[in-house]
Image (cartoon, grey):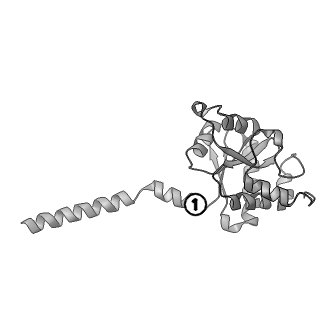
Amino acid sequence: MIRRVLLRSAAAMGACVLLMAHSPYRQWDVYRRVRLVIVASFEQQEAVRLGRRLVTALARHIPESRAMFARARDTNDLFRLLASRQLDVALVDADDARDAAGGGGLGGAGIPLRSLAQVGPYLLVCRDDLPRAAAYRIAEALADRWREILEASDGPGGPRPDPSAGVPLHPGAAEYYDDHAARPER
């Protein structure tokens, strides 16, 4: 009788462990670690169009990034995804990025954003904990594929963000831009 109770208890505990291990959040965490997901707000259709072009350029230049595009319902949701560390990179209006980094929105708590590139009126931003090497490679890919992206944008001659944008440049991206300052922009 005791043996039967112990076996049932062990089986129940084993089932609990298996069910608890099937968390969709762990799957999402792994999914986003092996893919570069760039998000833009559904409200900003031009950003959506440019974001898709960015992803195409990144996927061609850095195939192992498995770059893909996602849309947030609105700008507020986009910044919530960044603040909660669910996503790392977003294409947003430069004014919205400056406001979010400075504490405007999300209860006044600023998001530690860094800029990677500027595409017309939009900034490609990331959280400040994006690895330096990843930021360098993203800046390099955008500079090398700038003609593909430029067709969709009437932005500057290259991806380097304007310092007046108000969002500090990521150290990895800054390193790329500094290393290639003498090289003519494509």
Image quadrant in which the N terminus is located: bottom left
Front residue of 164/94: it is: 164
The kind of secondary structure element at disc 1 is helix
Query: Residue at 87% of width from left, 57% of height from top?
Result: 147
Circle 1 Cα neighbour tier, 10 Å, few/some/many (<14 / 14–19 / ≥20): few
Front residue of 116/112: it is: 112
How many marks can you see?
Answer: 1
Left or right, 142 with reference to 84:
right
Front residue of 157/107: it is: 107
Quarter occupied by residue 180: bottom right
- Residue 148 in sight here: no
Left or right, 175 with reference to 107:
right
Left or right, 113 with reference to 16:
right
| Outermost residue, left side | 1
Amino acid under disc 1? Arg
Q: Give the answer, above or below, for where 163 lies relative to 19.
A: above
Query: Residue at 38% of width from left, 60% of height from top?
Result: 21
Query: Residue at 72% of width from left, 37% of height from top?
Result: 98
Percent x, y for residue 23?
A: 42, 56
Front residue of 162/12: it is: 162
Percent x, y for residue 142?
A: 79, 58
Image quadrant in which the C terminus is located: bottom right
Left or right, 13 with reference to 177:
left
Residue that carries the numbered disc 1 in the rendered image: 33
- Residue 101 in sight here: yes
Percent x, y for residue 160?
A: 83, 50
Quarter occupied by residue 179: bottom right
Percent x, y for residue 5?
A: 12, 63
